[in-house]
Image (cartoon, helix red, strand yellow):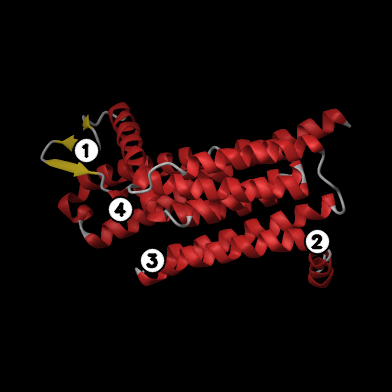
Amino acid sequence: MNMKRFLNKIAGHPLGVLYGTLLGIVAFAAAVPMFTAGMYDAALVDLAMAAILIVLMLKNTFKVSGRTSLWQEKCAAWAILILADVVALLPTHNFAGGISSALAFSLLVCASVLYFGGTFMATVSIVPTLWCCVFMPYHEEIMLLLSFPLRLSAAAFSSVLLNLAGIGVVHSGTSLTLPGVNIAITDACSGINQLDAFILIAFAAIELLHRKTVWKILHFTFMIPAVIAGNSLRIVLTVLLYRFYGDAVLENSWHTVLGYTQIVFALLIFFGVGKIFTAADKRTEGEES
C-alpha cells in the first residue's frame, strides 16, 4: 500500500483519524516534560513507538469500514465507562493514584471506540492507548519500578552462571561479592536506560518476522527475559575481565563498552528466539496446507 492510497483510506475513516489524533496529542504532551528534563533519547523513542502504534491502529480500522456496533458492544461500552468513572474516583495524590487517573482516561477512550467502532477496533486501540496515555506520562516512574526486579533477576542469574563456571560468588540482593571486590548492580546497570529503544526494536522485529498474532505475542513476552539474560552475560563478562585486568575493568571506559555488549547480547537472544518462532510458524503453515 503506497502512501497516497494509505492517506486516502485514512480520510475515509474519520473515527479512526479522531482517535489517532487524540492519542497523538496525548503522546506529544507526555513527551514535552521529558524533553524539558533532558531525556531526549527516551522522548524521541517513545514518540516513534507511539507513531508506529497509531499507524498500525489506523491500518486495522480499514478492516471495519462502515460497520456499526451491536447492542451487546454498546452495553459493554457503557459498563467500561462506569468502570472508568469508578477508577477516576480513586485518590490521585500519589503515584498509584496518578496511574489510576491515566487508566481511567484510557478506559474512557476504549469505551468510546467500542461504542462507535465495535470490538475489533476497540481491541486494536488498547495497546496504543495504554502506551500514549499511561506509559508515556509516567515513563520515569514506571521505569524505576521495573529497575529493581531487573537488577535482582540479573544478579541472581549471573551468580548462578559464575558459580557454575567455578568462580565463587556470594549473591545478596542486587550485589555480587567476590574476593576483594563487591559489585553492585545499580539502576544504570539494570538495562533500564536501553529498555525504551529495545521495546521499539523488538516491536519492529516482531512485525517483520511474524504474521500471526499468537506468534507476535509469544515472541514479545521474551523481551524482558532477553534484557535480563543480556545483562547477566555482561556481568559475567565483567567479572571474568576483572580477574585478568583488575580494577581497571570497573572504570568508566571499560564500563561503557561493557554496557554496549549488554545490548548486543540481549538483541542476539531476542532475535534467536524470533528465528525459532519463525521456523515453527512456517512449519505450522506447511502442516495446515
The circle on residue 13 is 2
For the point 40% across and 49% down, the residue is 98
User: Along the polypeptide, which appears first: circle 2 or circle 3?
Assistant: 2
Amino acid type of disc 3? Met
User: Along the polypeptide, which appears first: circle 1 or circle 4?
Assistant: 1
How many neighbours does mark 1 have within 10 angstroms: few (below 14), some (14-19), or many (20 or more)?
some
Residue in the foreground of this view, choosing between 85 and 30: 85
Q: Quadrant of the C terminus?
A: top right
The kind of secondary structure element at disc 3 is loop
User: Along the polypeptide, which appears first: circle 4 or circle 2?
Assistant: 2
User: Along the polypeptide, which appears first: circle 2 or circle 1?
Assistant: 2
The image shows residue 137 at horizontal and vertical percentages of: 45, 57
The circle on residue 175 is 1
User: Along the polypeptide, which appears first: circle 1 or circle 3?
Assistant: 3
> Which numbered mark, 3 or 4, is in the foreground of this view?
3
Q: CA distance from mark 1 to mark 3?
A: 28 Å
Residue in the foreground of this view, choosing between 23 and 55: 23
> Which numbered mark, 1 or 3, is in the foreground of this view?
3
The circle on residue 39 is 3
Amino acid type of disc 4? Ala
Q: Is residue 267 left or right of residue 168?
A: right
